[in-house]
Image: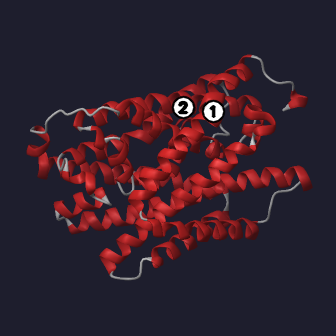
Amino acid sequence: MLNFARIYLIPGAVLQSVMIGGGYGTGREVVEYFTHYGTLGGVYAILVATLSIAVVFSMSLELARVYKVYDYRNFFKVLLGRFWFLYEILGVMLFMLVIAVIGSAAGQILRTELGIPAYMGSILMLIAVVLLTFYGRALIVLVLAYWSIFLYVVFAIYLLAVFVFFGSELSHAEATVTDGWFISGMQYSFYNITAAPIILYSARAIKTRRQALLAGIAGAMIAIVPALMLHVSFVTQFPMILSAELPVYEIFTLLDMDWLKLVYLVVLFGTFIETGAGNIQGFIERLDGWWMEKTGRVLARPVHALIAGLLVALAGTLAQVGIVSLIADGYGTLAWGFMIIYILPLLTVGVWRLVRPLPAADR
């Protein structure tokens, strides 16, 4: 059972954890890319995103398995050769954006609920991320996997409460579709699935092509189901929910269930922390791979923690821009860049590398 989880469930759970903080944790990302296109159009966009993520994630896992590359630097050396650094440029930009989004959301919630300065959210998140990073890959994978289970339980209770309190609004909701849902679903998948090369460290248990394929499909479903759950809940407050900065928080406020809101806040801060830690671990895996080539050993734990602290502190300065503009403008722009330097090469060069593997000396 444990081996089954390591192969088929943990890669998807870690992918979801890295994706979740800025989007599912606040709901803003779901509104921008799904609910914005109508009650039914949002479902169509979610289906498009699921299929796209499944294809790309499966191929990425298989490429990593065949070439034994579990950090994004070596992964893109197989895919892009000498131009591997192009992913790192966009990846660092996306990472900074993600940390800024979750830092902004954490600050808003602390200010609203506890009346304390917004910057305290970023400080608390920084401390937790640094501690997780210090203790390394094994702890991060374990925490991300178990927190994903906790998140599913809370979202299931949340959705049940929505059905109980707003069931009539949901049953009478008009099936609307707004043009652009297909492009939006693809765009959403392009920048979210770019986390796949970052979290390859969680897929070392995959040993066969069949396992890679099934793990990719399972991972897509694990990662995207919370988006469907949130979209269904947002339909009950459509179209008012489109302008909410923290849509999930708005729904919890309307439910007026203090205990559930408290549990949600705990889950939300946990998602912020796991998103930051999961992304930073991917960057550290890349640095460890480079340092191993240079010296024959990985970087020390205190260096890992120092890197994590500097990255979170630097990204926190972007949080002042505001969560809506960060997601609407930043994510959408980066999505097309990732399509060019990751998705298209994976579906062309990646397929060729799997059909005609590189000689060991050239890997």
Determine which quarter of the picture holds residue 221.
Answer: top left
Q: Does the rendering let one see residue 6? A: no
Between 349 and 300, the one nearer to me in the picture = 349
Furthest residue toward bottom = 116
Describe residue 67's horizontal placement relative to residue 24 as left or right. right
State the image coordinates of residue 33 (x, y, percent, origin top left): 37, 42
Determine which quarter of the picture holds residue 179.
Answer: top left
Type of residue at label 1? Ser
Q: Mark 2 — residue?
A: 216
State the image coordinates of residue 242 (x, y, percent, origin top left): 26, 51
Q: CA distance from mark 1 to mark 2?
A: 8 Å
Type of residue at label 2? Gly
Describe residue 204's horizontal placement relative to residue 287 as left or right. left
- Residues at discs 1 and 2 in contact (Cβ within 8 Å): yes
Q: Does the rendering let one see residue 246? A: yes
Residue 60 numbered tag? 1
- Residue for point 51% across, 63% down: 100
Between 321 and 303, the one nearer to me in the picture = 321
Classify mark 2: helix, strand or loop. Answer: helix
Classify mark 1: helix, strand or loop. Answer: helix
For disc 1, the neighbor class at 10 Å (few under 14, some 14 to 19, many from 20) is many
Of pointers 1 and 2, the one earlier in the residue sequence: 1
State the image coordinates of residue 227 (x, y, percent, origin top left): 36, 43
Q: Quadrant of the C terminus?
A: top right
Which marked residue is nearer to the observer: mark 1 or mark 2? Answer: 1
Indicate whether 110 appears above or below 7: below
Furthest residue toward top = 355
